[in-house]
Amino acid sequence: MSKTPITRRGLLGGGTILGTGLPGGGVLAQSPPPEAGAMTVDVGLTVNGVHHGLRLDPRTTLLDALREHLGLTGSKKGCDHGQCGACTVLVDGVRRNSCLNLAVSCDDREITTIEGLGSEQALHPMQAAFARHDGFQCGFCTPGQICSAVGMLAELKRGLPSAVTPQLAAATMEVAETEVRERMSGNICRCAAYPNIVAAILDAAGKT
């Protein structure tokens, strides 16, 4: 009898596993990773008012295109599953989780990242409000929080209701704390700076 120990890594890496326990008695095989650069597509991204012509793997997310190909690292890769909001950007003025959007789906659309909202010399009102109210601690989630807040206020101005909106037919929605908390619930702050974030958004609401 063989004394060679069987490990999970060795078992999975051995090529195929006999599927006697699988439905239909099939075979479970470990597929090799796709060959890098096997297929690329031309993508035109207009980011912060500047057009970029890129050649990308069609599976490249907007987040990776921004960070790895354009060097715009303000948008953070947190969960990479659309659950934390750290990668939020604006696409045609609408907030999007850039980790869930393929770059090819944003071809020739207007993309705004935290770098395009304002500058050190002229902060966006939302950026200035976050600074005044200390709406951040470690700062990792802050770019996504700010972009999401800007998009959220635009939704209110367009009259788009949320789960807590009392009057769904109102032409414009009230910028209330309950609305802010509900609409920003997709942006996670592990430092729990939520009270200050809400205060900053309410402050900026009259200035955007």
Image (cartoon, rainbow, N blue to C red):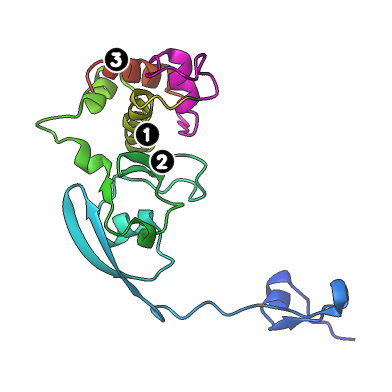
Who comes first in sequence, dot 3 or dot 2? 2
Separation of marks 3 and 2 at Cα, in angstroms? 22 Å
The residue closer to the viewer here, 14 or 33, is 33
The magenta stretch is: 162-191
Q: Residue at x 50, y 20 (%)?
A: 168
**Mark in front: 3 vs 2:** 3
Mark yes or no: residue 65 visible: yes
Q: Residue at x 27, y 19 (%)?
A: 204
Q: Which mark is residue 86?
A: 2
Q: Which mark is residue 203?
A: 3
Q: Residues within 10 Å of mark 3 (few under 14, many from 20)?
A: some
The residue closer to the viewer here, 130 or 152, is 152
Q: Residues within 10 Å of mark 1 (few under 14, many from 20)?
A: many
SS at circle 2: loop
Who comes first in sequence, dot 1 or dot 3? 1
Q: In which quarter of the view is residue 148 placed?
A: top left
Q: In which quarter of the view is residue 140 placed?
A: top left
